[in-house]
Image (cartoon, coloured by chain):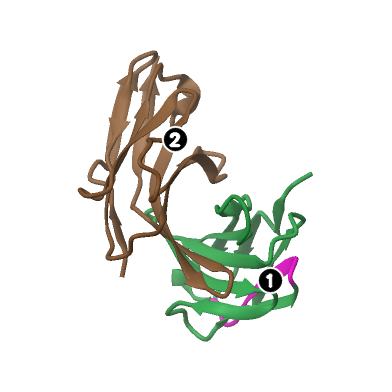
Chain colours: A green, B brown
Amino acid sequence: DTAVSQTPKYLVTQMGNDKSIKCEQNLGHDTMYWYKQDSKKFLKIMFSYNNKELIINETVPNRFSPKSPDKAHLNLHINSLELGDSAVYFCASSSQTGFEKLFFGSGTQLSVL
Amino acid sequence: AQTVTQSQPEMSVQEAETVTLSCTYDTSESNYYLFWYKQPPSRQMILVIRQEAYKQQNATENRFSVNFQKAAKSFSLKISDSQLGDTAMYFCAFMLYSGAGSYQLTFGKGTKLSVIP
């Protein structure tokens, strides 16, 4: 029973392509996030959504578009992929009530060739 | 803006020994949360320990404990009786409530810990 699941785990693609990463959580959380981990292992928030509404939108190129069809899903679509987009992308979720922490998915390693 | 600094990019420890990882942070807020996350080669982000800023008592989880010094904005992690499975990247993180049910988690750059048999 994976709490936060992302697919695919690995994604290899050519420059200029469009790709999507899917994320689903079965924890009943209201808030979901996307984090990017670069080649130096630095993790930085990209977006957060609460109940399908965008809350945090860090300085991320317009080519990145999150989509939340319902509060259990937050997908990340990336247009016109560039070499610098190569990274590990983590989805996470949190609940405002009770134990405040982020639950992370296992990450998607994106390689742009 | 909040910043988190981990001054030790790499550390090593002999199996069964104790090691302390350092973390300092900067914020003007008074209510926040602090975390240590572990990232083994499997890439999974695993929560090691959590501390609420309003609690003076240092958090402990089995072999893991923290030394939280709020005035000094310091949050170090002590691992006792180190095991080979502790080999991983360790991230210190600061979390603030950013409104509308959302939290902002700011990470340090990580400390790569190697446990030597």
Q: Position of residue A56 (x, y in %)?
A: 51, 76
Q: Is residue B51 above or below residue B98?
A: above
Q: Residues within 10 Å of mark 2 (few under 14, many from 20)?
A: many
Is residue B5 left or right of A111 when viewed as pictured?
A: left
Q: Is residue A8 above or below residue A70?
A: above
Q: Amino acid at mark 2?
A: Ala
CA distance for labels 2 and 1: 28 Å
Foreground pick, B116 / B62: B62
The chain holding disc 1 is A
Q: Nearer the viewer, residue B85 or A86?
A: B85
User: SS class of the residue under badge 1?
Assistant: strand
Q: Which residue is mark 2?
A: B88
Give the labeled residue for mark 1: A75
Residue drawn at x 74%, y 47% is A2
Answer yes or no: is residue A113 visible: no
Which of B15 and A80 lies nearest the eye of the viewer?
Answer: B15
In percent of width and height, residue A27 lies at 74, 54
- The three-letter amino acid code for the residue at tag 1 is Asn
Q: From this viewpoint, is residue B2 visible?
A: yes
Magenta stretch encompasses residue A73: yes
Identify the secondary structure beneath mark 2.
strand
A62 w.r.t. A88: above or below: below
- Residue name at image x 39 percent, y 15 percent: B15
Q: Which mark is residue A83?
A: none
Write the start and end of the magenta stretch as one range. Answer: A71-81
Q: Quadrant of the C terminus of chain B?
A: top left
Find residue A47 and report its horizontal and vertical position in percent.
54, 73
Q: Is A19 included in the stretch rendered in magenta?
A: no
Residue shown at 47% from the left, 82% from the top: A61
- Disc 1 residue crowd, few under 14, some 14–19, many 20+, Cα 10 Å: many
Q: Give the letter of the chain under mark 2.
A: B
Instruction: Give the quarter of the figure containing the N terminus of chain B.
Output: bottom left
